[in-house]
Image (cartoon, rainbow, N blue to C red):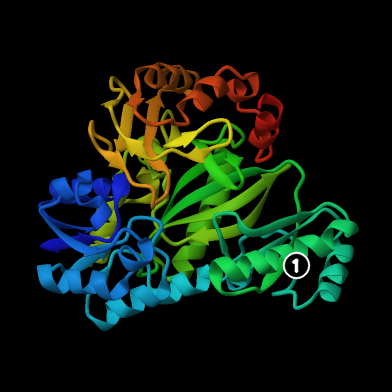
Amino acid sequence: MFKKILIANRGEIALRVIRACQEMGIASVAVHSTADADAMHVRMADESVCIGPPSGTLSYLSVPNIISACEITGAEAIHPGYGFLSENAAFVQALEDHEITFIGPSSAHIRMMGDKITAKETMINLGVPCVPGSDGGVPDLAAARKVAESMGYPVIVKATAGGGGRGMKLAKTAKDLDTAFSSARSEAKAAFGNDEVYIEKYLQKPRHIEVQVFGDGKGRAVHLGERDCSLQRRHQKVFEEAPSPAIDAETRARIGKTCADAIAEMGYSGAGTIEFLYEDGEFYFIEMNTRLQVEHPVTEAVYDVDLVREQILVAAGEGMTMQQENLLPRGHAIECRINAEKLPDFRPSPGRIAAFHAPGGLGVRMDSALYQGYSIPPYYDSLIGKLIVFGQDRPTALARLRRALGELIVDGVDTTTPLFHALLDEPDIQTGNYTIHWLEKWLESNT
């Protein structure tokens, strides 16, 4: 087992990993920018190393600085959290070259799934259902028109190296395609340095369903059911729950086995999430995230597992403890992403926390790095906390969420908490009758 792990991240996810290390008797190393010198993850780790100025590019994304921090502290392994370098194949390759263990999949698997076209081809070959679309990248507008006409409108143009909703443009009609194609390419070039795009059929009323998978890197894999992440704004998840209100036990077992079999055949190691659009009883693969997800706590609650602990065990060569026959879902869990943003336009709202109180009680978990007096820096993502509730069924979880939101206090900055208060009053949310387009339409009609 590792004696010391460096966490190449910040905020609540860094705290999440530090806590797992503490429970396993492993020393932890926090890295931080100068803007995060007083951050909670720095205070809670056994050691800390400053790796650069506030800019993420010069600190949390600096591979040489992070490797140097490992060498200085003697850390044997790195946990990447999510975001930053968590899905950067070149970073993982650099760690392999320096004989530092990456707590996650191989650089080859990250590279394979990081390119949307390669990922789709791989999944088709592994028997995973995919959205109808172009065979690889679309080189020019003439080819784009031909593909779109062959499958019928609407279609969506996507960056092959995309993520986070960037490089994705909808074309409802042939007239829209010219703008969508050029816009997607320019946005992809700016965001990823790669302007290659592909085209997929645009589903009208799908849900966003993702399946949590985990492999030991030796041909054994399990699934831990699905999460419903359909409530999104600008392709960014806002509210996640497990299990999905739209999936029954038979369907869950079927798609779960398909996904577990696929990553077992890949020889995949560690945690991963296979994401689908789900419509009319059919699943359509869209991408695989080769890391721990922001919303992993809802799966942990429903399956009573510690996914970070399992990641560390597998990376250390000790194997995963999970057996598929023992992974039985129970109850219902919901997560709300609390962002430091000002409604109704969701503008970032950094600033000093005048008061903070985390909700508690039965079935309530608050993952946050906030504390009274902390100043939220303006340089990073606006996520400041994740409120997770668990109950014996969905109505209980919703009631618990309403109560927990009422207890949450974050003074000094604006947050998205009022959005969730409003959503809980909506009949569609109460019944689970929503799609990936629901929240955008609701926001348009309520602002």
Q: Nearer the viewer, residue 83 or 118?
A: 83
Q: Nearer the viewer, residue 28 or 112?
A: 28
Above or below, 331 against 115 in this view is above
Which residue is depicted at the point 30% across and 64% down? 59
Amino acid carrying label 1: it is Ser
Q: Which residue is mark 1?
A: 182
Number of numbered labels in the structure image: 1
Kind of element beneath mark 1 = helix
Which residue is depicted at the point 19% across and 46% down? 38
Q: Residues within 10 Å of mark 1 (few under 14, many from 20)?
A: some
Residue 117's x, y, as percent? 63, 71
Quadrant location of the N terminus in the rendered image: bottom left
Side (left or right) of 4 relative to 311: left
Visible in this render: residue 320?
no
Residue 162's x, y, as percent? 58, 64
Q: Nearer the viewer, residue 217 or 421?
A: 421
Side (left or right) of 73 relative to 14: left
Q: Quadrant of residue 409?
A: top left
Quadrant location of the C terminus in the rendered image: top right
Side (left or right) of 187 relative to 27: right
Q: Quadrant of residue 12?
A: top left
Which residue is depicted at the point 29% across and 52% down? 10
Which residue is depicted at the point 39% across and 51% down? 380
Visible in this render: residue 243?
yes
Residue 168's x, y, as percent? 67, 58
Q: Nearer the viewer, residue 390 or 96?
A: 96
Above or below, 177 against 143 in this view is above
Q: Quadrant of residue 413?
A: top left
Above or below, 352 against 420 in this view is below
